[in-house]
Amino acid sequence: MKLWGGRFTKEENQLVHNFNESLSFDRKFYRQDIQGSMAHVKMLAKTGIISNDDRDAILNGLEGILSDIDNGKLEFTNEHEDIHSFVEANLIERVGEAGKRLHTGRSRNDQVALDMKLYARDEIRELDGLVKELLLALHNIMKDNIDTFMPGFTHLQKAQPVTLAHHIGAYFEMFKRDRGRLKDIYERMNYCPLGSGALAGTTYPLDREMTAELLDFYGPTLNSMDSVSDRDYLIELLSALSVIMMHLSRFSEEIIIWNTNEYRFVEIDDAYSTGSSIMPQKKNPDIAELVRGKTGRVYGALMSMLTAMKGIPLAYNKDMQEDKEFTFDAIDTVKGCLALFTGMLKTMTFRRYVMEESAKKGFTNATDAADYLVGKGVPFRDAHGIVGQLVLFCIDKNIALDDMTIEEYKSISPVFDEDIYDAISLKTCVEKRVTIGAPGMEAMKKVIELNEKYLCGQAL
Ligand code: ARG
């Protein structure tokens, strides 16, 4: 049954129906659609546009529809064009005449704008909670590892020693910014488009403040043409989701590398690994690889959305129906990735000894050896050259700087003394980096304290 059959003389072609329909995917926000209708109908009664009796009949009917969908009694049948038509048709079937008054002063254009906003808003809250869970997991790893030394890398070559807490702390910052982005989007989008009608408002004396308040918005939107054709908040959301995926993907890549036979920095728990059908020895990091792989489809959703919107003249055009499938998929993908990734991280074993040995072997303390010479009056450029010679010497003998004898040191530069060993120990190298943001333990403790406070703060 069509909502708009009156003006038409021919039945809709089946292929046209299939091409045009959105019920197969916009059923996902039936809850929000009904929630919006309930607010609308309460306002219609309050402003005297419909009677209280009609309001009560409609509310009853809508509640029935909601619970029947929830517990599977009411099934979506594909003769309906979209979720809005489906709910309205069912309502009329249940409550008769009164149901026909629900759509007074409303268009599907402001209705769908509202539904999508309500849906996105609910999902943003959920996403925020999942990112917070991940931050908590990172925080716990940081607290336990302020003295777990490991090599820090540039160009994927060992560079300077850091700690596991410091390395994980970098991701803490990234995901903290991600939460900030979600919050910004929430704040900007939280205005109610209901009451904008098809594009030009309505002639009914609607109380838009009332519906905005009932639906927990900051207030009504201020331009009806923009209200029905604004999908900026979805583009912003898909962009924030893309950044989350980019972060998760980088992290996944590191875990995949750390989990290799060559690195052995971590061991992914059996529950988060998979085997090979042919090679009995294999334990593969599939979860991390899938997270890395799924990043592309979230980027794809962002590109699709930007492209869909770029040529649309004001106000509503059907192109906008394309906002849904990609967005739903992107949100579900990110939620899945966040949950799985956090689980993998919580159960992963960090091989502290292996990390520390690796930091020792890669000349990560070479900069500190040069700084030692500078401390004894050698110009930095000369010190750099001298330590370069030490490194060559060690590579030739397959030893670390720490393993050279004092005589060997002195043969390269007489400036070296016994205190060189302490100066280049991993502990000293890390501990001397005390400015805020650096891996030194005192600096890390301050950051962890700030993170703790941040985590106690308000969720969305
Ligand atoms: N299914 C439509 C959408 O998702 C609902 C709005 C329909 N409005 C219209 N004028 N045809 O955009």
Image (tube, rainbow, N blue to C red):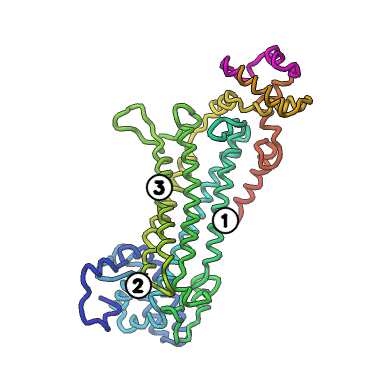
Question: Mark 2 falls on what kind of element?
Answer: helix
Question: Mark 3 falls on what kind of element?
Answer: helix
On whether ligand 1 comes within 8 Å of the CB at mark 2, the answer is yes
Q: Amino acid at mark 3?
A: Lys
Give the foreground label among 2 and 3: 3
253 over 226 or under it: above or below: above
Q: Position of residue 162 (x, y in %)?
A: 61, 33
What residue is at 36 percent from the left and 70 percent from the top?
318
Question: Cβ–Cβ below 8 Å for labels 2 and 3?
Answer: no
Q: Amino acid at mark 1?
A: Gly
Q: Which residue is mark 3?
A: 294
Q: Which residue is mark 1?
A: 180
Question: Mark 1 falls on what kind of element?
Answer: helix
408 over 145 or under it: above or below: above
Question: Cβ–Cβ below 8 Å for labels 1 and 3?
Answer: no
Q: Is residue 358 left or right of residue 390?
A: left
Q: Which residue is mark 2?
A: 84
* Front residue of 419 and 126: 419
Start-end of magenta stretch: 394-418
